[in-house]
Image (tube, coloured by chain):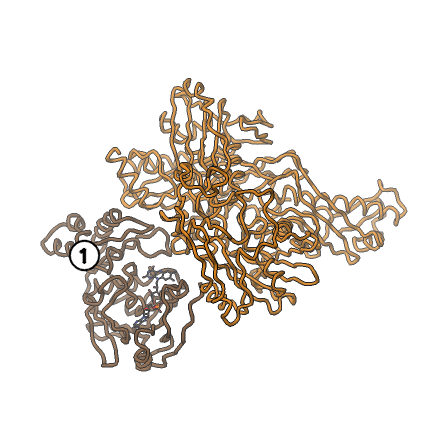
Chain colours: A brown, B orange
Amino acid sequence: MIPATFTYRRAESADHAVVLVGEHGDEAKLLAGGHSLLPLMKLRLAVPEVVVDIGRVRELSFIRDLGDQVAIGALTRHHDLENSALLARELPLLAHAAGQVGDPQVRHRGTIGGSLAHGDPASDLPAVVLALEATLVARGPNGTREIAAADFYRGLFETALEPDELLTEVRVPKPAGAGWSFQKFTKRAIDWAIVGVAAQGDKVALVNMGPTPLRATAVERALADGASVEDAAQRAAEGTEPPADLNAGPAFREHLARVLVRRALEESRA
Amino acid sequence: MGTRVVRVEDPRLLTTGGTYTDDLREPELTGAAYVTFVRSPYAHARITGVDVSAARGVPGVVEVLTGQDTDDLPAPADGNPTAEPMLAKDAVRYVGEPVALVVTDGRYQGEDAADLVTVEYEPLPPVVDLEDALRGETLLFPESGSNVLAAAQDEGAGDDAFAACEVVVEHTIVNQRVAPVPLETRAAAAAWAHDRLTVWVSTQNAHWARDAVAGGLGIDPSAVRVITPDVGGGFGAKIGADREGVAVAWAAKRTGRPVRWVETRSENLVGMTHGRGQRQTFKIGGTRDGRITAYRLDLVQDAGAYPRMATLLATLTKSMASGVYDIPHVEAYFQVAATNTTPVAAYRGAGRPEATAAIERAVDMFAAEIGMDPREVRRRNFIAPDKFPHTTPGGMEYDTGEYAAALDRVLAAAGYDELRAEQARRREAGDPVQLGIGLSAYVEITGGVPEIGETARLVVHDDGTVTVLTGSSPHGQGHATAWAMLVHDELGIPMDKITVRHGDTDAIPVGIGTFGSRSLQLGGTAVHQAALEVKERAKELAADELEADKADLEFDTADGLWRVRGTPDIGLDWGRLAQLAGSDGLAADVHFTSDKSTFPFGAHVAVVEVDAETGKVRLVRHVTVDDAGPVLNPVLAEGQRQGGIAQGAAQALLEEVLYDAQGNPVTSTLVDYPFITATELPSFELVDMATPTPLNPLGVKGIGEAGTIGATPAVQNAVVDAVSHLGVRHIDMPTTPERVWTAINEARTGQ
Ligand SMILES: Cc1cc2nc3c(=O)[nH]c(=O)nc-3n(C[C@H](O)[C@H](O)[C@H](O)COP(=O)(O)OP(=O)(O)OC[C@H]3O[C@@H](n4cnc5c(N)ncnc54)[C@H](O)[C@@H]3O)c2cc1C
């Protein structure tokens, strides 16, 4: 429960952070809210030599209305997402889902950038940005690039970010009034989802149904072809690779995906 | 008695905070080094070599000690083959077993140095589940010839009794292993000076900890002083001192340097003893009109890797097998099996929850089989109130009990008939969220070896204040409040002038401690009797001083003055009486013992909602009667019931310690071990009932474990009840969503 020795560096700005990780490459880890990284370090499952703390980089904490999009800084805490009037109006799915993350302590520390960059398929916000078809903005030694959420997740805890890149913001298109729903199935209120479903209109994404967050493409296709909610939801597990763990085996997860997708679509259309 | 007094402990705990073992800044601990344990990564292996040279070379390392260094310690009594060593020397028998320890200047250095201790292991096949243990292909203790550490074997004595039954139901259920998870993990600190050890340890009983340290180190108990600071929960798993606590004391003595140790949560989840861990096969038989005539319980108790208290647990389950029921034929058997897992010991209820869980499931399954309301079956089989004291087939002598009254009262409070009507409505409507109503009726045994009793010393000081020295040992219960109330009741001295001291073996030479729901009935009675003795002595002193006859003296508890009847102007207060007592002091010493245990009882009703599509269970109401006799302070008694119910519900709904096939613990963090939180629980509805026992002058029984014992089967029965109309007969605990969903599927497809 005590991390291995590491060097601590504090970034004063986003550019400074890029410089610092550039200096140390693979040996460095960015530290945002620390609520995923520090537990791993305490268990010595993560053993970075250098920790670059971006916790005080204020310029990365914002929620801005860009007209047809909302831009959210990577260091915005879950608590701020949950309580943003702008998000409540324009992206209620994101605000609501952020309020379902862990407990109040976790929501006051954890950040959207950390949540997205960590690449845990059991996390809530990655599926939400998938359903919302957001764009992620990364800054590296060679400048800035944009990555579509659909291209961001590569595998279990694996993203399109390079080790020397910093996720700076998320740009989310405003969904223009379509209904939404977030279904999170847990044993306890504080838990990660055993299975989760984020629905925005007829776009549906799944939490914890494979090594990455997934779009429920079979469901979306069925809906586009005019299938009923009931019938479309039956296809929720198609193309998924649900894990087996202490909470559930694959068969139960597949069943949950079907039930929760149906409930999500019913709620988003109600 | 019966007054709602707020806890005197709380202002300090809620403002400046408690002083737990790791918070201690005593002068004796100045410059203390830190102990870090090296623990086995294997469930079962032979140790073929230990190399500490790399660890020794690290800056900050004071000492590295291994099993090889323990030769100066006493050998286990008469070569006991199953003895648990302080540090494993030849073999390891569970993941997390202490193999070595490092003493370092800093806490962080300890973890790095521990990584550098190289232990060579030759892995042996692990014995993980009970079937493997009983098969005995691999033995944990080859010299003992079997993995069965103790047994009372099934003789099938009652086969005739079952043959005569109209209905017989037989089933095997699991009472799963759970972790106690006290908020404060285990901790100890020790200093060796002037040929004496002072040991601070987070324990439920300082005196047993002292004896464990003295015995383990082969020194005289008088050379050990144990002090217990604030203790953040124990639940039975902090009785005495574990091997780590003894090792910490040993490290202080070996190095001559004060040392301290506090375990991490992950260490706690594998190093502290677990509870429960029984596989139970029951057979219950009777008539179609609901009379139970025969019951058999055959259980296997998982002992874990060493025989700590497992045989005691199994024995208690056996003794209490028939619960609140008057069953003509009862038989119970057990085998206690060693496995390569963390040792199992007491956990809130220790053996009695397991007995209650078995018979309460059995009664519900019997009721389902004959198609009768489980309330009705219980009513037809309770031991009648006129049969007390009542000796059970298991040899227990129940003192007092009003079992039917307890059930009626809780059912009335719950609105049982309306709940059943609501359940019927939802069933008819095919509501995806079904309602389940679960009952349990229980009796349990409290007093925790009453023959050894408990001590109290009460001293009145010259300034009219009082010190109570108690051999009992609080770890969250509120003894300071309760003991002060008992003294105040008799002596009229304000609560804020009464100081309660506990947990210091120098100040209190004899004491037993807190476990088995024993404190008020033994320790409290001792305090009460000490107050009465002081009062008697005071009367003599007052009579002398006032030159009156003892019979003419009056004591007024309202103002705490002694007067001669008819002369209201002249009164003696406690301070004056203490002065008059002179060098003798105004004090009393009591060691109260009882030759009999008490038997609290009660009934619980749990109401759950089960999402029949996803299997998710929500406990929506929990209503209880927990009758432990007259209540000294409802605030304290309700606190015990609330916490107990929460832990009982946790076992039914969520918690389970799990190992993989290699014996690796897979629930060693609080992410993986889903211990219950307030968000999963409703406010409990506590109904009063108080039936006194004649076994002590206060008439009280124990309340510490009752909630847990009653809650688990009520919640489990409620979950099964919610889906019984779908054909489900039983669901093992914890009743997780996947289990409930699987049970519904299996019932539907007729598997
Ligand atoms: C008790 C508990 C319960 C939780 N429950 C949930 C839950 O229910 N649902 C859920 O979704 N999550 C849950 N979490 C996780 C929580 O939301 C984390 O805070 C979040 O996943 C990570 O955000 P962070 O800011 O803490 O990231 P950190 O832990 O600081 O970092 C995580 C990873 O992301 C990298 N990183 C961080 N910021 C950036 C950046 N700007 N650019 C590039 N890389 C970056 C880090 O290097 C690290 O590898 C829980 C955590 C805890 C401790």
* Res. B625 visible in picture: no
Identify which residue is drawn at 60% across, 31% down: B399
Residue B196: give x, y in percent of width and height.
Answer: 68, 59
Residue B239: give x, y in percent of width and height.
Answer: 57, 48
Horizontal placement of B434 versus B307: left or right? left
At label 1, counting other C-alpha atoms closer than 10 Å, the crowd grade (few under 14, some 14-19, many 20 or more) is many
Q: Residue type at mark 1: give it.
A: Ala
The residue at label 1 has a CB less than 8 Å from ligand 1: no
Viewer-proximal residue, B45 or B652?
B45
Pick the quarter of the image with the C terminus of chain B.
Answer: top left
Q: Is residue B160 above or below residue A48?
A: above
Q: Is residue B255 above or below residue B204?
A: below
Horizontal placement of B308 versus A226: left or right? right
Identify which residue is drawn at 73% across, 44% down: B590
Question: What is the tally of numbered marks visible in this picture?
Answer: 1
Q: What secondary structure is found at the residue carrying circle 1?
A: loop
Pick the quarter of the image with the N terminus of chain B.
Answer: top right
Quick one: which residue is furthest to the left in this view? A225
Give me the chain letter of mark 1: A
Identify the residue position indicated by label 1 in the image: A216
Horizontal placement of B666 versus B305: left or right? left
Q: Is residue B55 above or below residue A262?
A: below
Residue B294: give x, y in percent of width and height.
Answer: 45, 23
Which image quarter has ligand 1? bottom left
Q: Is residue B287 above or below residue A92?
A: above
Horizontal placement of A228 versus B543: left or right? left
Quick one: which residue is furthest to the right in this view? B547
* Res. B372 visible in picture: yes
Residue B437: give x, y in percent of width and height.
Answer: 39, 37
Identify which residue is drawn at 30% across, 64% down: A95
